[in-house]
Image (cartoon, rainbow, N blue to C red):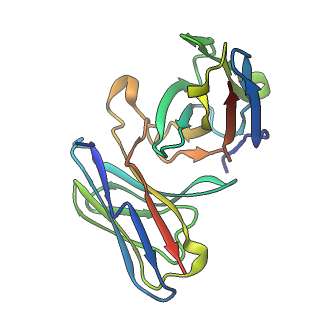
Amino acid sequence: AQKVTQAQTEISVVEKEDVTLDCVYETRDTTYYLFWYKQPPSGELVFLIRRNSFDEQNEISGRYSWNFQKSTSSFNFTITASQVVDSAVYFCALSEAKTSGSRLTFGEGTQLTVNP
Amino acid sequence: DADVTQTPRNRITKTGKRIMLECSQTKGHDRMYWYRQDPGLGLRLIYYSFDVKDINKGEISDGYSVSRQAQAKFSLSLESAIPNQTALYFCATSDPTSGSSAGELFFGEGSRLTVL
């Protein structure tokens, strides 16, 4: 069975601080996808990134960066110079590749609050 | 207009009532999903459908049923609602053939259900 753990339930930082959200996953599959979604206070779910298990390169997109380490089954998300607009719940998710990445298993979510 | 539309967006009902949540999409995707979000539990899969003739149970299907009326429509029913079904419900779609977006879920805006 697949499992995703986001051990940090809530994180509070002051604007401009860097913050890392942890994600640890379990799967028996050798190929899989990892995702991060953002849920702002308005409630919608916003896709941030998809990573294929074959690709362990870290990725940077503006202030966001992701560190995928297969050896530790982790896919951590860092926000550099955080802003108030980054306040949201962030979900890490895992899916099996054999069904072309459908049926995501989500972590519990991390509530990030960025204070001015 | 949103690509994935859920109705109603908010509903308050009483224990024992039958409730239907509807989802329609204009993305042309074959795959559709119903997820439930509870605080501290993330999103959990209720049912999913890979095409009109295919319906599958997710991890928490008890107390729910679904109907895939057409490629674009996927409804979730609570035959006899109970208070612990109070949650935020999301419909989603995906397209496994869409290259870089394969596996990505496209979510509706959510339906908040309260069962008294």
Q: Tell which of A39 and A26 is nearer to you.
A: A39
* Number of numbered labels in the structure image: 0
Q: Nearer the viewer, residue B62 or A70?
A: B62
Res. A112 in view: yes
Query: Is residue A27 visible from the viewing direction of this image?
Result: no
Q: Horizontal and vertical percent for residue A50? A: 51, 27
Q: Quadrant of residue B13?
A: bottom left
Taking B8 as reference, is A87 left or right?
Answer: right
Tell me what residue is drawn at x 71 percent, y 23 percent: A70
Instruction: Give the quarter of the image for residue B53.
Output: bottom left
Q: Residue furthest bottom?
A: B16
Res A36 quadrant in image: top right
**Which residue is at a point 59% across and 39% down the rendered structure image?**
A93
Above/below status of A1 relative to A79: below
User: Residue B49: image x %, image y %?
Assistant: 36, 57
Residue B6 at x, y percent in the picture: 33, 57
Q: Where's the C terminus of chain A, which quadrant? A: top right
Residue drawn where x is 43% and y is 35% of the image: B104
Q: Give the residue at x 68% y 40%.
A: A111
Report x, y in % for residue A32.
Answer: 57, 33
Vertical side of B17 occupied by A62: above or below: above
- Is residue B115 left or right of B74 when viewed as pictured? right
